[in-house]
Amino acid sequence: MLWVLFLLVAWGAAVVSCTRLCLAAVAAAQPMEPDPGADGKGLSLYEAAFLSGGPGRVGDLALVTMYRERRLLLAHTGWVTVVDPDGRDELERAVISAIGPEGQAPVRPVRAALATAVPVRALGDRLVAAGLAVSASAGTNVAVAVRHVRAACALVLVTAAAALLLVPPAAGRGPVAAWFVLPLLLTASCLLIARVEAHPYSRWASPAGQRLLGRIDVPPRRTLAQRSRDDADGGDTDGGDTDGSDADSDLLTALAVHGTTALPDPALRAALKTHWGH
């Protein structure tokens, strides 16, 4: 009957870790009292970028915006060069400051610096205060809780194997294995539910933020690719600057919501290929 001790360990780990995950997910889904008027407002591109991909997405959007306006150069080798050293707002000035006085730097450290820049942190704080974003602590708590459930799932498997080794084959190992199936199902189902339900809320956007993101009309990638080819061929001479402005707006909207995978230009994707988790 020594295997019962392993069963108790398995059940204890499963129950404690799953309970912690449930509590963390509930807290993340309701981070703060939302602003009553927030749900009726539209999102700016930088706000949409933060809610979709966090500080990293905001940095990508700033770099690509300045690149499309020809105030930065982004090389496919992963280097960024300043063309216009005068930033138009705090975020652009943070980009130029992150690149450094030499006016050229690898993209990776620039993006890392932008993730903790004051304007990006202030943007996140405003979204959290409006009830649209999940606070960093709530998101961290869910991530930690998920790791604990994964560890508990592995522990259930280990304890089950150990318990089965203690049971003589003649005594029958089937009933012992059946007892360990229950905590294994509990942890596995919690991980599945967390993947489906908790993950969208625990990363960056609260339920209110998710609703606003769902209202953004993002053009399909095929349309963006066609416009990119038109730009490369010289564009439509009858369209004037309006078509180019619309193309830029659609491209930046797709980037804000879907990340660098939405960029139709392979050279631009190569310049931003060093991901930080989005």
Image (spheres, rainbow, N blue to C red):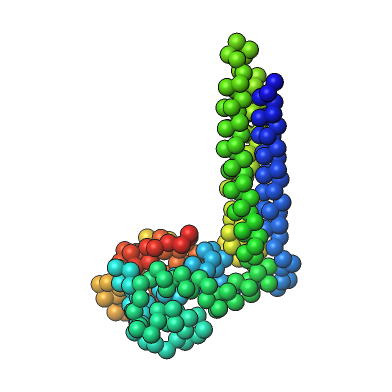
- Which residue is most to the bottom? 86
Does 242 sit above or below residue 219? below
Query: Would residue 253 appear left or right of 161 to someone viewing this image?
Result: left
Name the residue located 60 percent from the left edge and 37 percent from the top edge: 155
Image coordinates of residue 78 in percent, x first then y, are: 33, 69
Query: Would residue 186 appear left or right of 218 to someone viewing this image?
Result: right
Does 172 sit above or below residue 261? above
Q: Can residue 102 be seen from the camera position used here?
A: yes
Name the residue located 70 percent from the left edge and 43 percent from the top edge: 16
Name the residue located 68 percent from the left edge and 53 percent from the top edge: 24
Image coordinates of residue 2 in percent, x first then y, are: 68, 23
Q: Quadrant of residue 225?
A: bottom left
Query: Would residue 7 appear left or right of 82 to someone viewing this image?
Result: right
Depth check: give the residue in front, 46 or 244: 46
**Quadrant the N terminus occupies:** top right
Depth check: give the residue in front, 139 or 199: 139
- Which residue is most to the left? 233
Image coordinates of residue 217 in percent, x first then y, are: 51, 65
Q: Quadrant of residue 209?
A: bottom right
Name the residue located 64 percent from the left edge and 21 percent from the top edge: 176
Q: Can residue 192 be seen from the camera position used here?
A: no
Image coordinates of residue 201 in percent, x first then y, are: 62, 57
Query: Would residue 157 appear left or right of 248 to someone viewing this image?
Result: right
Q: How many dots with numbers? A: 0
